[in-house]
Structures are given as structure tokens and as C-alpha cells.
Image: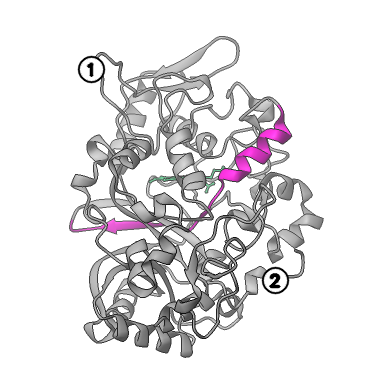
């Protein structure tokens, strides 16, 4: 696996391996395919002119003015391909979409997060997402406007915007984008294997955890979408490994989860100040850090192997099993419990690594709504096993790590008491000895405003979509 040079692979869309951090602004444009032929002609032109940024082109030294990447929903793929042939090869989460009653319960999309109140995604009535990255918001908007036109067979729907603030912080002011899986076969993995083996042991994941077509943590190939041989007359796709008579539409592609998350920044800090004023020694920042599970500047709360940015991800919680440094219910501990999911640290790490994902989120500020937040984007090989499991079984689990009546204090859905059930709105800060501080009656600080599940195909798969008869 060492020599495949994944990070420079011309078949993989660039966003998987790069956050395009030198392009501060992003536009995420939802679209519907109105004219199949015109859309296919446009996509062919885009590919011929090499306008879809790949891992290879984004690795080149010269900086492009902008980057474009594209992903599709199940309905988009069904419009372009032989619908019957793909339906049974995708996992149900992707086919059904993010908004289903049972899924909403699992994800915590109830109460204030109920899709009925979302700004977009409620009806999942879009076929794809065109993502433009540029140096200004206007340029990102113009880029999408130039492509998503009736002449190109596309109806432009809602566009949401995201930006990077230069300091690498999210809207509560915490350093973000620190802990990512390190994917086998990438340059980073190969370098770190020799220079920082501990980091690779903690964060190294097989390629198949984030990219289809390669073995995942089970040693097997992840389920990959298939299409009929008839929909690929030019034979651009490899045969499917599971159904040899079909073609592998998934290889070098990945599933993309998008959630627009509004953050009540003022409410968050007001409550931290108020709780700090109640005493017990913590400052407002100290309390917020306990909830996130990291210092505001990104430093580790859990004992790490050293100080400074090189060490801020070198911890596995094994020496903080009671959560006296990093609370058991904090955001980073719930979203990646590392070595403490079960009794044996190594076994636990191998299990938790099966739920990791590559995060590519950006902040947003919506002046019209007077709102700030996070455009959360993540890539994974299985929406169910990775994103949905983390959100539902870890972050929104009231009994996570033996806790009671709490959810993730950053992204969990607080629930009021009712129907004979107690409220779920607490957060425990364990301390040395038997002392702990219990914060009760917390509100949710994050509200979902929209979301959808997409598939970001490889370049070869885009060629197939563009030419399917
Ligand atoms: C507005 C909402 C959110 C905020 C403010 C937020 C904030 C943060 C911060 C400050 C960190 C620590 C820095 C880092 O390691 O990058 C972090 C880590 C992380 N977050 Fe979030 N996050 C949000 C939503 C989500 C969602 C929806 C998920 C997935 C369900 C998620 C999954 C993760 C993961 C996996 C990590 C890394 C954990 C680790 O490996 O240590 N976050 N987040």
C-alpha cells in the first residue's frame, strides 16, 4: 500500500485530502438536474477542461484561483444511471437520505433540530452539490452561478457559504481541524510512520475507512456502489469486485455528509460566565474547555506525551479513564473515545478507528439571520458505521461511558422532561477523589439548519456519469 501515492492520485477529487485552506471562501450549491443531456455535456466539458480539482492537481505547487468539486445524492445518480442497477448496492442511509423519521430520532434531529424547521434539506429535493472554493465569497458565488445554469441542465437551488477565519477556529472560538485520521498510503502516513510512529498508532486508518475500493479496518473491501455494464459503454470503470457482471462506481469515491449547524455563541459564553460565577473554581473558558475536551488553543486536556502542537493529539485517554482531565462526556471524547471504549486499550483503538471520518467543515456567518455556525462536512466509507454511529450512538447517547441523562454538550440534542421521563440536559465534570461537578439544565447550543447525504465520485466515475446512455 506504501507506493500508491494516494494524496496525488489523479482519480480522486481533491477535497478528500485537502481542505483548500489557501481559499478562504466556499460556496456549497445545491442543484437539480433538469436536462439530463445538457447536464452530461456540461460535466463532460468540466472534465475535459480539467476543472474538477483532483488530489493530483491540488498537490501542485502553483495555486489555482479556485477549486471545484462535485457530489451527488441518490436521486442525482438515479437520474444519470440505470436506477435499478444502483439501488441495491448503496447502503440504505444514502438511498433514503438524511430525513427519515427513524433517522431523525437517531441523529437527534428532533425538537429544535426537527427537519420541519430546516432551511434546506427538509424534502431532500436536490440531486447534487457543487462546491466552489475561492478567495472571496463573491468569487465562490460567481463560480457556482457560472456553472449551475439552465443551459447546463441544472437548476440552482440554495447555496450556503463557509469560510476559514485564518486562525483555524470554529465559531465558539476553539481551535478546530486538529484531530484527523491519518490515511494509509498517503504521504503524511508514510512520513509519520518513521518520524512519529506513536501518532500513526493512534490515528492511522486503512484507506478503505474513507475511500472505496481499498481494504478497510476489517481487512475487507467496503461495500461499493455498482452500476450496470450497459451504463458504462466506454468501459471507464473497473469490474465490480462483488458483482463481476457490473461496474464499480465507487472506487476512489467517498460518501459526504453535510450539516449546517447554527451555534449560539453568545448564549454559550453567557452561560459559561454565569456558571463560572457560581464558584467551584473554574473560569468560563475552563468550563467551555471541559465541554469541548480540549483547550481553546487546541492543546490537550488529557495527559499527552509532551507539550506543544506536535503533541496535542498524542493521547489515548487510557491514563484518564475516569475523565478527571478530559471529561468522559466531552465532545472530543464522545466523538472519538480512542483507547477507552473497552478494557483493552489496543482492542478499543482498533474498534474506535472504525468510526473515524475526515472532517472538512468551515465556519459561516449569515448576517441576514444574525447567525454564526459551522458548515459541517465529513467524508467516510459508510455513513451508517461512521457519521451516524458517532452522532447517534456516541454523541447523543445519554448513557455513554456510564454517564446518565447527558448528551454531547456541544452537538447533543438536549431533551426536556416529559411522558414520565427525566430531562437529558446534564454534564459531569469528574474530579480527583469522589468529587465531581454536575452541571444541570443545560440548553443545546447548536441547532441543525439543513443537511444531506452525498456521494463524491472519482473522476472515472464522473466520466461514466457524463457519458451514460
Ligand atoms: C457546531 C458544531 C461543532 C463544533 C463547534 C465542533 C467543535 C469541535 C472542536 C473544537 C474539536 C476539537 C478540535 C479538533 O480536534 O479538530 C472537535 C473535534 C471533533 N469533532 Fe466536532 N464540532 C462540531 C460538530 C461535530 C459533528 C457534527 C461531529 C460528528 C458527528 C463532530 C465530530 C468531531 C470529531 C470526530 C472530532 C475529533 C475528535 C478527536 O479525534 O479527538 N463534530 N469538534
Residue ID at (22%, 83%): 150
Total labels: the figure holds 2
Q: Determine which residue is flagged by label 2.
A: 5
Relative horizontal placement of residue 104, taking residue 117 as reference (left or right): right
In the rendered image, the vertical position of residue 203 relative to residue 39, given as above or below: above
Q: Is residue 20 visible?
A: no
The answer for how far apart the CA atoms under marks 2 and 1 are is 56 Å
Residue ID at (27%, 64%): 126
In the rendered image, the vertical position of residue 276 relative to residue 218, given as above or below: above
In the image, residue 76 lies at what x, y percent? 34, 68
* Chain-order first, disc 2 or disc 1: 2
Rendered-image quadrant of the C terminus? bottom left
Label at residue 419: 1
Q: Is mark 1 within 8 Å of ligand 1?
A: no
> Does 351 appear in magenta?
yes
In the image, residue 148 lies at what x, y percent? 28, 78
Residue ID at (40%, 24%): 406
Q: Which residues are magenta?
A: 344-368
Residue ID at (50%, 62%): 225
Closest to the observer: 388 or 55?
Answer: 388
Disc 2 element = loop
Disc 1 element = loop
In the image, residue 290 lies at what x, y percent? 49, 31
Closest to the observer: 171 or 179?
Answer: 179
Amino acid at each position: 500500500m506504501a507506493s500508491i501515492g494516494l494524496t496525488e492520485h489523479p482519480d480522486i477529487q481533491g477535497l478528500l485530502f485537502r481542505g483548500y485552506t489557501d481559499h478562504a471562501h466556499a460556496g456549497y450549491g445545491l442543484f437539480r438536474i433538469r436536462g439530463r443531456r445538457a447536464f452530461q455535456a456540461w460535466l463532460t466539458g468540466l472534465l475535459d477542461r480539467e476543472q474538477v480539482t483532483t488530489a493530483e492537481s491540488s498537490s501542485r505547487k502553483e495555486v489555482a484561483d479556485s477549486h471545484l468539486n462535485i457530489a451527488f445524492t441518490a436521486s442525482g445518480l438515479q437520474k444519470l444511471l440505470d436506477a435499478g442497477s444502483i439501488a441495491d448496492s448503496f447502503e440504505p442511509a444514502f438511498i433514503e437520505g438524511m430525513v427519515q423519521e427513524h433517522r431523525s430520532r437517531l441523529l437527534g434531529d428532533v425538537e429544535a433540530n426537527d427537519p420541519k424547521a430546516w432551511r434546506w434539506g427538509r424534502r431532500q429535493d436536490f440531486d447534487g452539490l457543487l462546491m466552489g472554493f475561492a478567495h472571496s465569497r463573491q468569487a465562490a458565488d460567481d463560480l457556482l452561478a457560472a456553472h449551475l445554469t439552465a443551459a447546463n441542465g441544472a437548476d440552482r437551488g440554495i447555496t450556503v457559504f463557509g469560510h476559514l477565519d485564518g486562525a483555524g477556529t470554529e465559531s465558539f472560538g476553539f481551535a478546530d481541524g486538529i484531530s484527523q485520521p491519518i490515511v494509509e498510503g498517503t504521504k503524511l502516513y508514510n512520513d509519520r510512520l518513521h518520524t512519529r510512529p506513536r501518532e500513526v498508532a493512534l490515528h492511522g486508518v486503512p484507506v478503505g475507512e474513507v475511500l472505496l475500493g481499498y481494504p478497510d479496518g476489517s481487512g475487507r473491501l467496503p461495500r461499493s456502489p455498482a452500476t450496470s455494464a450497459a451504463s458504462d459503454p466506454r468501459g471507464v470503470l473497473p469490474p465490480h469486485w462483488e458483482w463481476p457482471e457490473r461496474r464499480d462506481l465507487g472506487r476512489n469515491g467517498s460518501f459526504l455528509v453535510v450539516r449546517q449547524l447554527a451555534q449560539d455563541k453568545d448564549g454559550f459564553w453567557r452561560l459559561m460566565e454565569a456558571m463560572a460565577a457560581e464558584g467551584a473554581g473554574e473560569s468560563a473558558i475552563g468550563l467551555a474547555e471541559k465541554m469541548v475536551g480540549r483547550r481553546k488553543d487546541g492543546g490537550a486536556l488529557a495527559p499527552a506525551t509532551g507539550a506543544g502542537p506536535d503533541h496535542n493529539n498524542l493521547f489515548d485517554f487510557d491514563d484518564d479513564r475516569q475523565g478527571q482531565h478530559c471529561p468522559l462526556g466531552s465532545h472530543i471524547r464522545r466523538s472519538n473515545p480512542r483507547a477507552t471504549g473497552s478494557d483493552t486499550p489496543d482492542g478499543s483503538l482498533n474498534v474506535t478507528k472504525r468510526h473515524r471520518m475526515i472532517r472538512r467543515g468551515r465556519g459561516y456567518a449569515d448576517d441576514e439571520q444574525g447567525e454564526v455556525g459551522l458548515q459541517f462536512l465529513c467524508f467516510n466509507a459508510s455513513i451508517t458505521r461512521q457519521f451516524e454511529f458517532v452522532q447517534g450512538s456516541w454523541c447523543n447517547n445519554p448513557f455513554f461511558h456510564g454517564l446518565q441523562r447527558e448528551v454531547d454538550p456541544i452537538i447533543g440534542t438536549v431533551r426536556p422532561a416529559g411522558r414520565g421521563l427525566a430531562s437529558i440536559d446534564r454534564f459531569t465534570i469528574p474530579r480527583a477523589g469522589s468529587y465531581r461537578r454536575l452541571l444541570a439544565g443545560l440548553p443545546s447550543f447548536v441547532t441543525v439548519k439543513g443537511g444531506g447525504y452525498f456521494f463524491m465520485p472519482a473522476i472515472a466515475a464522473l466520466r461514466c456519469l457524463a457519458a451514460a446512455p
